[in-house]
Image (spheres, rainbow, N blue to C red):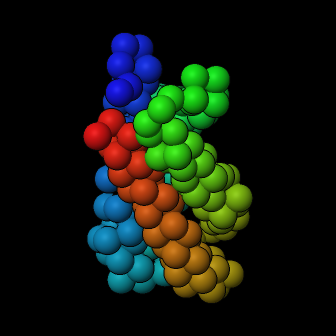
Amino acid sequence: MIDGPYFVLVVLGLLGTAVVAGVFCGFSTFVMKGLASLPPAQGAAAMQAINISAVTPAFMLVFVGTAVLCAVLAVVTFVLWPDEGTVALLLGSALYLVGCFGVTMVANVPRNDTLATLDPGTREAAAYWQRYASEWTMWNHVRTAASVGAALCYLLALA
């Protein structure tokens, strides 16, 4: 049974991955659909504004803090190698670190950076927006599933 400070770390990991999963799920299920239904200039401009406003201390604390917590959980799990929950804890950490945080860095952020350089009213932006909305959302589905999987793994480790 996981207990003491280790239990607290796992519960915090569960909560962090679940909160991030909820944010990404919202984007995958309705935010991006709504933005994609707008004329390209409006959708691109709205997403540019969202990308700027997303980089807040509160969201970064949850998103990056959860990545740090998952890394700490992986290290502590390797050191303690508990009798129960080891596989679930390591899998949960890997899912979040690779499937959520890693995908964000290699797939979503570069697309956001490219979108940020474009004037939403141009043909170039309109053409990019169509591809952006589709590709960004696909990768966001991956981040959502990875975060949900991580939360589920941490929950199973506690069971």
Res 90 visible: yes
Quadrant for residue 76, please give it.
Answer: top right
Residue shown at the point (51%, 39%) measured from the top left:
86
Which quarter of the rendered picture does the N terminus lie within?
top left
Quadrant for residue 127, please give it.
Answer: bottom right
Quadrant for residue 136, please give it.
Answer: bottom right
Residue shown at the point (66%, 63%) measured from the top left:
107
Res 93 visible: no
**Residue 90 falls left or right of residue 49:** right
Residue nearer the viewer, 90 or 23: 90
Q: Position of residue 134 (x, y in %)?
A: 52, 81
Q: Position of residue 132 (x, y in %)?
A: 58, 76
**Residue 97 falls left or right of residue 61:** right
Which quarter of the rendered picture does the C terminus lie within?
top left
Q: Where is residue 135 in the image (x, y as percent from the top left)?
A: 58, 77
Residue nearer the viewer, 38 or 34: 34
The extreme front residue here reads 83
Residue nearer the viewer, 141 or 42: 141
Q: In this view, does 8 lie above or below 110?
A: above
Residue shown at the point (41%, 14%) measured from the top left:
5
